[in-house]
Image (cartoon, rainbow, N blue to C red):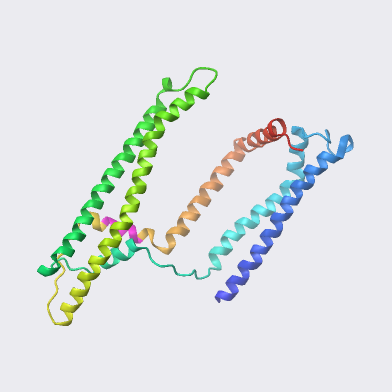
Amino acid sequence: MTEKTCKKVRLIYGCALSVITLILGAFLIWQTLEIYLSGRTGPFSGGGAFTQGEVEMRLLYMISPVFLIWFAMAVVGFILFEIFTVSTQKTKPDVRYTLARLKKRLNYTVAENLQTSLNTVKREQLILKILRICCGALCAAAAVYAIVYLCIPSNFPAAENKTIPIFDMIKRVTPFVAAAFAVCCGVAVYESISAKKQLREVNKLLSAQRAAKAEGVPVTQTQSITLYNKLYNKFSFIIHSKYFLLAMRITVGCLCAVFIILGIFNGSMRDMLVKAIKICTECIGLG
């Protein structure tokens, strides 16, 4: 199937889904106006007032069929977009990905004049490992502290006015979470800076390596493949696989469907509908 046909199918489906979305929105507006303008002689009891029974009846009997059609089209669209695939525009690879790819070709036995470049690469690798370990330890400590703090019943407010005690709880937990987030952001920024620095040195080493190979000098690869490198290469291959994102989408979709079905059977759907109606009619005040 040609890419032109796939694009045409996607465009037609997108237009159809947009139309049914507009129809669903129009139904919602129409039913809202119908309640507001119908007075006491409307087709439903309690017409003219946004009561729970009035809103619930209209949602179930007037809007539900359109919503089910919209939901079915959304599911069909998910399948169509996986079948009728189109090529995406290739973006410039991340500098860290380029660095990891070039390091696989690197010979760690170099001449004396290139030892400085090699030492720079090794030093940056060591610094990054230390930073990642510290970042992971800090995040783990912050998570453990927050979980332990929230699991102690005495930390929760017992007073009727819970606003001030809740703010005190937030002030106790927020600094640890903020520190962990700041450290993660800092490590991510330093990784990008370090990758650019390493890339310059790796290019120098590879250029010298290619020149030596052209002159007939034997090149031996002496880099030791550690357990860390093996695990990193394996998981990197899995994550960058074209099927990984599809598998994640299917898994999340199945979990959502399972939770929706469980919610329908245990009565949670009706409870949430009643709560939503009460919020809209008693608090916000539709109309």
Where residue 94 sits in the image (x, y, percent)?
37, 63
| On-image quarter of the C terminus | top right
* Residue 155 seen in render: yes
Residue 227 in sight from this viewpoint: no
Magenta span dominant secondary structure = helix
Residue 140 relative to residue 83: left or right: left
Which residue sits furthest top?
159
Residue 76 pos. (x, y %): 61, 59
Does residue 170 lie above or below 198 as drawn? above
Residues shaded magenta: 231-237
Q: Nearer the viewer, residue 222 or 265?
A: 222
46 sits to left or right of 214: right
Numbered disc total: 0
Residue at 18% across, 78% down: 211
Residue depicted at 76% across the width and 33% down the height:
53
Quarter in which the N terminus is drawn: bottom right
* Among the 4 quarters of the image, the one containing residue 141: top left
* Residue at 38% across, 58% down: 239
- Comparing 258 with 133, the one in front is 133
Q: Residue at x 52, y 24 (%)?
A: 163
